[in-house]
Image (spheres, grey):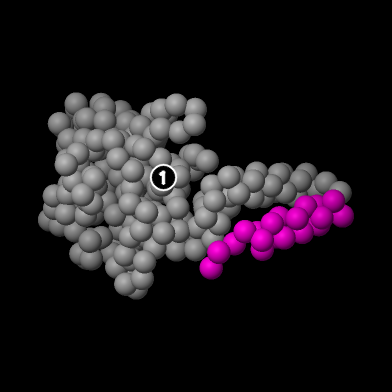
Amino acid sequence: MMLAIPELLSPDQVAALRRLLQDSGDWVDGRMTAGWQGAPVKRNEQIREGSATAIAAQATVLMALERNPLFISAALPNTVYPPMFNRYDEGMAFGAHVDGAVRLDPRTGLKLRTDLSATLFLSDPDDYDGGELEIADAYGVQAVKLNAGDLILYPARSLHQVTPITRGERLASFFWVESLVRDDARRAILFDLDQAIQVLNRTEADAEARRGLVGCYHNLLREWVET
């Protein structure tokens, strides 16, 4: 399942993050965090992991994720990898690759299974040309270029790339999620069920039927959750 989450960050939050990142001296070659598959096709810059800039920026993104019901419903997060931040200038790109299945969480030293990949756009589409996030799924290749503050969530197993920048600068945050429910199809069923329940709650549909659906949701979650 691929899902766009609009306005994860407000315009003021985006502006503050952009100032923090653009004024930082913590930019390093993005290949420092790439695996053997990604390094040959990766050309961008990233904020150094563990830097004061990274920690401050991560706090903003993580707080927004915790407060966003659409993200919680879709991702069912068990662990969120500390968000990272990248910059693409003219001529930079990240060729086709699949994200690594396991990453070491720098906060805990524990291994994290990457079920979902996420990109949070911090530049508006008019700020740059090129730079689309192209994601291959069952329906073909989807080109994603969202407004600043919007997030795209998609299965980490997907082949994807960032096309070359031909004008301007593209700032973004990216991270991975280990979900309580590993299987993407099962997460999609739970998401659809949860969204239907929310609609029924807002319309004050039959209370007994709603209780039954909520019970079905949690019983499915109980069957499928991995902790």
* 205 in relation to 83, above or below: above
Quadrant of residue 185 within the rendered picture:
top right
Residue 126 drawn at (x, y percent)? 30, 28
Q: Is residue 213 magenta?
A: yes
Residue at 49% from the left image edge and 27% from the top image edge:
139
Name the residue at the bottom extreme.
Answer: 108
Residue 6 drawn at (x, y percent)? 48, 41
Q: Which residue is mark 1?
A: 157
Q: Is residue 71 magenta?
A: no
* 200 in relation to 137, above or below: below
Quadrant of residue 95 within the rendered picture:
top left
* 20 in relation to 146, above or below: below
Residue 148 drawn at (x, y percent)? 36, 40
Front in this rendered view, residue 35 or 87: 35
Magenta region, residue range: 207-227
Disc 1 is placed on an element classified as loop
Residue at 45% from the left image edge and 58% from the top image edge:
178
Q: Amino acid at mark 1?
A: Arg
Residue 208 drawn at (x, y percent)? 87, 55
The 10 Å Cα crowd at callout 1, few under 14, some 14 to 19, many 20 or more, is some
Is residue 173 visible to the viewer in this orientation of the structure?
yes
Is residue 10 visible to the viewer in this orientation of the structure?
no
Front in this rendered view, residue 44 or 227: 227
